[in-house]
Image (cartoon, rainbow, N blue to C red):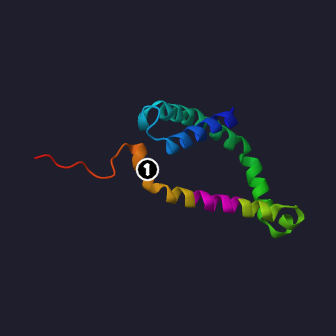
Amino acid sequence: MLVVVTLVLVGTGVAQFLAPNEFNGPRGAIYDAHVVSFVIWVPLVLTHVVRHAKDVRRLARRDLRRVTREAVPGATVRQAIVLTGLAAGLALALSLVGHVHTYLNVPLTPPALSR
């Protein structure tokens, strides 16, 4: 269920980004599907995180220690992939900040004042 809702959430987010004026604009059907999928996704991901918290604490400590990291094949590569993914996500988020006006329904330039 979490995978399906995540795919819907990401898919509707990408659709909003690529075609912000389609499907009745920024507050249309895709926006509604995105909001609903987010509302469903939050409790699912929170449940998932809580259920795996003990495993993460135990495994993260072992993964960060040099002795156990060297004993586990691929641990260093896994850490590099995670850090690269975080850096790429941050770079993408910062590069898209200029497009947020589309989703806030705020014009780029203020309307001319009428006299």
Residue shown at the point (63%, 59%) measured from the top left: 86
Front-most of 11 and 63? 11
Left or right, 39 with respect to 21, comes to right
Return the x and y of residue 35 as percentages of the image width and height.
Answer: 50, 35
Badge 1 amino acid: Val
What segment carries the magenta color? Answer: 82-90
The residue most toward the left is 115
- Looking at the rendered image, the quarter that the N terminus falls into is top right
Instruction: Give the dominant element type of the magenta stretch: helix, strand or loop.
Output: helix
Report crowding for label 1: few under 14, some 14 to 19, many 20 or more residues within 10 A (C-alpha).
Answer: few
Return the x and y of residue 65 as percentages of the image width and height.
Answer: 79, 66
Left or right, 112 with respect to 81, comes to left
Dot 1: what SS?
Answer: helix
Q: Which residue is mark 1?
A: 100
Residue shown at the point (20%, 49%) measured from the top left: 112
Q: Is residue 64 above or below residue 59?
A: below
Return the x and y of residue 94 as percentages of the image width and height.
Answer: 50, 59
Front-most of 80 and 52? 80
Residue shown at the point (46%, 35%) measured from the top left: 22
